[in-house]
Image (tube, grey):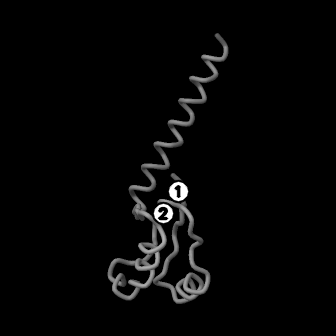
């Protein structure tokens, strides 16, 4: 399984929307994780083209909102520190 990640696309800005329309996300991953500010919920109808594209080109797409993304990143960082310490302890035995 392969995972691709894109964050903070801010499609509500015309320049960003133009860029993504002309340079779509490369495909090939099974799962696409969208993180943070992709667009404002009130403008979702205007950006159906984007969701059509990702649903046609990725097996599954998950949009992780900013608050949840912060929790996930913090959890991963803490886990990395714990694993690093555990591996150091195990290595010293």
* Above or below, 36 relative to 14: above
* Label 2, residues with CA under 10 Å away: few <14, some 14-19, many ≥20: many
Q: Are marks 2 and 1 in contact (CB under 8 Å)?
A: yes
Depth check: give the residue in front, 17 or 2: 2
Question: Which residue is pictured at 61% across the width and 81% down the height?
Answer: 23
x, y percentage for residue 60? Answer: 41, 63
* Label 1, residues with CA under 10 Å away: few <14, some 14-19, many ≥20: few
Depth check: give the residue in front, 48 or 74: 48
* Above or below, 63 relative to 17: above
Tell which residue pokes out farthest to the top in this image: 93
Sequence-wise, the earlier of marks 2 and 1 is 1
Q: Quadrant of the C terminus?
A: top right
Q: In terms of secondary structure, where does tag 1 sit?
A: strand
* Above or below, 44 relative to 65: below
Is residue 64 left or right of 20 when viewed as pictured? left
x, y percentage for residue 4? Answer: 54, 60
x, y percentage for residue 28? Answer: 57, 65
Q: Which residue is mark 2?
A: 32
Question: Which residue is pictured at 59% across the width and 25% down the height?
Answer: 85
x, y percentage for residue 5? Answer: 54, 61
Is residue 8 left or right of 93 when viewed as pictured? left
Question: Which residue is pictured at 49% across the width and 77% down the height?
Answer: 10
Which quadrant of the structure image shows residue 66?
A: bottom left
* Above or below, 91 relative to 14: above
Instruction: Determine the CA span between mark 2 and mark 1.
Output: 6 Å
Q: In terms of secondary structure, where does tag 2 sit?
A: strand
Question: Which residue is pictured at 35% across the width and 81% down the height?
Answer: 44
Q: Which residue is mark 1?
A: 3
Tell which residue pokes out farthest to the right in this image: 92
The number of discs equals 2
The label on residue 19 is none
């Amino acid at each position: 399984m392969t995972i691709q990640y894109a964050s903070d696309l801010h499609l509500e800005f015309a320049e960003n929307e133009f860029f993504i329309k002309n340079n779509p996300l490369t495909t090939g991953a099974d799962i696409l994780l969208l993180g943070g500010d992709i667009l404002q919920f009130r403008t979702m109808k205007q950006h159906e083209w984007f969701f059509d594209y990702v649903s046609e080109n990725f097996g599954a797409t998950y949009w992780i909102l900013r608050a949840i993304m912060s929790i996930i990143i913090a959890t991963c960082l803490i886990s990395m520190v714990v694993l690093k310490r555990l591996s150091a302890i195990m290595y010293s035995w």
